[in-house]
Image (tube, grey):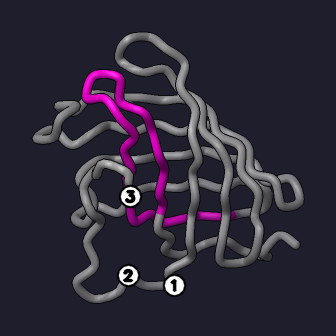
Amino acid sequence: MAKDNLSGIWQSHYRFTSSSRGGEYEAWHYVLIHHKDNQVIIESLSGVNHSYLMMRLSLDEQILTGTWQETTDPAGYYKGSTYYGAIQAVIRTPEHIDGRWVGVDKERQVQTGPWELTYVGKELPAGAAAPQVAKAN
């Protein structure tokens, strides 16, 4: 079921629990996926995101496994901090990927949460901007 080529613009969305702010939060990024053979590189698009996100993944049929790293918005709550961890996800359809991330927070506690990617197209829609981190409902 894996899409022949995942390359293109996708919207990334994940949830995390903030122990310092209390509660669950969501973060979005517009990302560019570079896919060749079984290697998938995901990188946030400059100019539309508040933080920088990078993933390096291996593809085995419809399973993606690898690492992620995010440097947060220098002007945001986390002041340009860098976080990293692992991720595993499944290509559910050619336009939707979902999985789970794991990483360590500021208090050195292991956290985990859902991560989804939704295909946007070969180009970013006019006027598109990723929202900042927001408190989840």
- Nearest-to-viewer mark from 3 and 2: 3
**CA separation, marks 3 and 2?**
14 Å
Q: Residue at label 3?
A: 28
Residues at marks 2 and 1 touching, judged by CB atoms closer than 8 Å: yes
Q: Earlier in the sequence, mark 3 or mark 2?
A: 3
Q: Reply above or below: 68 against 82.
A: below
The kind of residue on which mark 3 rests is Trp
- In which image quadrant can residue 85 be found? top right
Drawn side of residue 76 relative to residue 37, left or right: left
Quarter placement of the C terminus: bottom left
Q: Reply above or below: 104 against 10.
A: above
Main secondary-structure element of the magenta-colored stretch? strand
SS at circle 2:
loop
The kind of residue on which mark 1 rests is Gly
- In which image quadrant can residue 92 be found? bottom right
The mark total stands at: 3
* Segment tinted magenta in the rendering: 12-35
Q: Which mark is residue 124?
A: 2
Instruction: Sort mark 2 into few (<14), some (14-19) or many (20+) by Cα contacts within 10 Å.
Output: some
**CA separation, marks 1 and 3?**
16 Å
SS at circle 3:
strand
Drawn side of residue 117 relative to residue 21, left or right: right
SS at circle 1:
strand
- Nearest-to-viewer mark from 1 and 3: 3
Which residue appears at 17% of the width and 31% of the height? 79
Q: Residue at label 1?
A: 121
**CA separation, marks 2 and 1?**
7 Å
